[in-house]
């Protein structure tokens, strides 16, 4: 966070960001105009940026690379990722439903989940999802038996390699002590593969691992390859998937590797271990596809100055549209789209409108000193795990989503209404 009061580092904005007379446009669309047309809070996505990241993923990893839809899913996003050549990773029946509704063919879907229900497995088999990643012995039992009534699904075995990636404890998944996957060191991964080799109702197709999320150090992925290489070679299944997890820069001073650099590092590690090129190396990026494409717009409702202590700036959303600061202590920048290039000398705490003190969006936020009630305030890099983890806490309707491209805005998810909040009441 810039203690020095610098203007926003514009590398945190999507590529099509332009500043004219201080005002920010994305893809030729003025953000303040969007706020007045659609209201706030509002999620705005640079559509071309999303497409470019999908294209980059496909060219870096090759066919079979899947967008991890948990990062941000709507029908429009599902369709976009598919149009750009990606498969989609879905981890619940709900994500599966939305992806299919978005027009993604089932064969381009990869089903995940550490506790898939019978119904989720049956739906996956019925529609014919392309790949199922199995996570436990219980699931193998269920899948092997359910699959007898269907053409054999392609199955990958999720292995926890025992890598502790440098990230928040809640989003680390590669360590031994994890609810996910089959332990490598314990020999469970081997047992799972050997068991599936005996099962005619499924087609054993690959090895999968996912070591965590928001990872900046490519070494962590290389370490996973180092651990699994002999195992991968021994069974020589058609696919090895390294999962997702590539980090993105959220605040000034952070620097993340590109998707291309990530793929290069993993493929290079595989080549060094002589993993044959007949084995397809794939991945499942989520955050790195969508995070920087998204910006959230809020309206400032109140400013409370407590002399010598703190200034609270309250906006019209909060932990219901961005729970990441509360859950993981994640940092964000804030800026005013009316003067993006203005210095931000004033230290404030930007909070939401929920009924708890933990409802913080940015604890130490630097803002321009003319910030006033009624201003539109923006948080960049909110395209991942914001909308997808949004809630109706305090019965706040969830914000709409607008895609901008070539000077046009299109609403892809409308704002929830108060009646939507009553929709399921009986
Ligand atoms: N593959 C699997 C099996 C995953 O579990 C995940 C994320 C991904 C791929 C995509 O990872 P990504 O490329 O987005 O890092 N809510 C947290 C992140 C949770 C990630 C869960 N799994 C956050 O807001 O930081």
Image (spheres, rainbow, N blue to C red):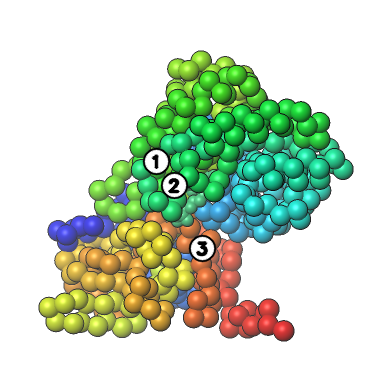
According to the picture, the residue beneath numbered tag 2 turns out to be: 172
Q: Is residue 176 visible?
A: yes
Vertically, is 216 above or below 282?
A: below
Foreground label between 3 and 2: 2
Q: Residue at x 40, y 51 (%)?
A: 169
Q: Is residue 50 visible?
A: no
For the C terminus, give its image quadrant.
bottom right
Mark 2 vs 1: CB contact within 8 A: yes
> 10 Å neighbourhood of mark 3: few (<14), some, or many (≥20)?
some
Q: Position of residue 120 (x, y in %)?
A: 73, 53
Asked if disc 3 is less than 8 Å from ligand 1, the answer is yes
Mark 3 vs 2: CB contact within 8 A: no
Q: Where, by quadrant of the figure, is residue 239 drawn?
A: top right
Q: Residue at x 60, y 26 (%)?
A: 280
> 10 Å neighbourhood of mark 2: few (<14), some, or many (≥20)?
many
How far apart marks 3 and 2 lie (CA) works out to: 18 Å
According to the picture, the residue beneath numbered tag 3 turns out to be: 389
**Going from the N terminus, do you reach mark 3 or mark 2 first?**
2
């Amino acid at each position: 966070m810039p203690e020095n009061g610098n203007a926003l580092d514009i590398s945190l904005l999507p590529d099509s960001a332009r500043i004219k007379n201080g005002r920010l446009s994305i893809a030729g669309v003025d953000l303040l105009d969007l706020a007045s047309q659609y209201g706030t809070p509002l999620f705005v996505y640079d559509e071309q940026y999303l497409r470019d990241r999908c294209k980059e993923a496909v060219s870096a990893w090759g066919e079979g690379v899947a967008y991890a839809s948990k990062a941000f899913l709507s029908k429009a996003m599902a369709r976009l990722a598919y149009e750009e050549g990606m498969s989609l990773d879905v981890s619940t029946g709900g994500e599966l439903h939305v992806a299919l509704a978005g027009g993604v063919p089932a064969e381009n879907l990869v089903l995940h989940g550490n506790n898939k229900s019978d119904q989720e497995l049956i739906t996956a088999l019925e529609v014919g999802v392309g790949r199922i990643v199995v996570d436990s012995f219980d699931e193998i039992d269920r899948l092997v038996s359910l699959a007898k009534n269907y053409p054999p699904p392609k199955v990958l075995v999720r292995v926890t390699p025992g890598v502790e990636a440098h990230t928040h404890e809640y989003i680390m998944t590669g360590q031994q002590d994890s609810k996910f996957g089959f332990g490598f060191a314990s020999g469970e991964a081997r047992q799972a593969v050997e068991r599936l080799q005996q099962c005619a109702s499924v087609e054993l197709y690959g090895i999968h691992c996912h070591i965590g999320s928001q990872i900046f150090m490519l070494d962590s992925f290389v370490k996973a390859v180092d651990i699994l290489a002999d195992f991968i070679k021994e069974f020589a299944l058609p696919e090895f998937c390294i999962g997702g997890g590539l980090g993105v820069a959220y605040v000034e001073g952070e620097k993340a590797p590109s998707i291309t650099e990530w793929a290069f590092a993993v493929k290079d590690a595989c080549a060094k271990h002589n993993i044959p090129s007949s084995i397809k190396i794939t991945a499942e990026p989520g955050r790195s596809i969508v995070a920087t494409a998204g910006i959230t717009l809020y309206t400032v409702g109140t400013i409370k100055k407590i002399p010598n202590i703190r200034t609270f700036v309250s906006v019209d959303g909060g932990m219901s549209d961005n729970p990441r600061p509360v859950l993981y202590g994640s940092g964000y920048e804030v800026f005013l789209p009316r003067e993006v290039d203005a210095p931000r000398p004033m230290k404030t705490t930007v909070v939401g409108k929920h009924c708890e003190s933990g409802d913080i969006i940015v604890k130490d936020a630097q803002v321009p000193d003319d910030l006033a009630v009624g201003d539109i305030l923006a948080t960049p890099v909110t395209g991942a795990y914001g909308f997808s983890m949004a809630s109706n806490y305090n019965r706040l309707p969830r914000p709409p989503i607008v895609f901008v491209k070539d000077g046009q805005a299109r609403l892809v998810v409308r704002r929830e209404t108060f009646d939507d909040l009553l929709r399921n009441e009986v």
